């Protein structure tokens, strides 16, 4: 299992983040025996969610209050892509 911690793009909206995530996930599945790559995203971050879904990630559920950010506990949406799904893409 591999966790993708953070991808930040300084000039969003041009598909660079999506290409980076696709390349990272492809590298993980080619060069390791990982079965699953997962990440978390704030549920309201629609841009990131669309990018991850376009690469093949699927929403799995909400980790309630799991992130402490900006002085408050926030929910995180857990998303993952499995090796079997990736090879089918």
Image (cartoon, rainbow, N blue to C red):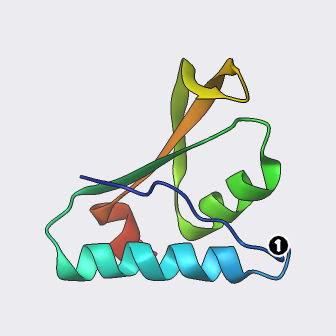
Query: Tag 1: Cα neighbours inside 10 Å, few (<14), some, or many (≥20)?
Result: few
Q: What residue is drawn where x is 33% and y is 81%?
A: 27
Residue 15 in the image: x percent, y percent?
Answer: 75, 80
Classify 48 as above or below 44.
below
Q: Is residue 38 left or right of residue 27?
A: right
Quarter location, residue 55? bottom right
Total labels drawn: 1
Quarter location, residue 36? bottom left
Q: Is residue 79 left or right of residue 24?
A: right
Q: Residue furthest front?
A: 71
> Which residue in the protein does label 1 denote?
12
Q: What residue is drawn where x is 59% and y is 25%?
A: 68
Tell me the element at label 1: loop
Quarter location, residue 12? bottom right
Residue 59 in the image: x percent, y percent?
Answer: 56, 41
Residue 53 in the image: x percent, y percent?
Answer: 62, 58
Q: Is residue 31 left or right of residue 63?
A: left
Q: Judge by depth and name the residue closer to the eye, 7 or 53.
A: 7
Q: What residue is drawn where x is 61% and y is 60%?
A: 52
Residue 41 in the image: x percent, y percent?
Answer: 62, 43
Q: What residue is drawn where x is 78% and y is 74%?
A: 10
């Amino acid at each position: 299992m591999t966790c993708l911690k953070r991808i930040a793009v300084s000039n969003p909206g041009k598909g660079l983040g999506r290409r980076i995530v696709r390349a990272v996930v492809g590298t993980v599945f080619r060069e390791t025996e990982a079965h699953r790559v997962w990440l978390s995203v704030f549920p309201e971050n629609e841009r990131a969610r669309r990018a991850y879904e376009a690469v093949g990630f699927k929403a799995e559920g909400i980790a309630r209050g799991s992130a402490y950010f900006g002085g408050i506990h926030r929910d995180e949406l857990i998303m993952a892509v499995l090796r079997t799904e990736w090879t089918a893409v």
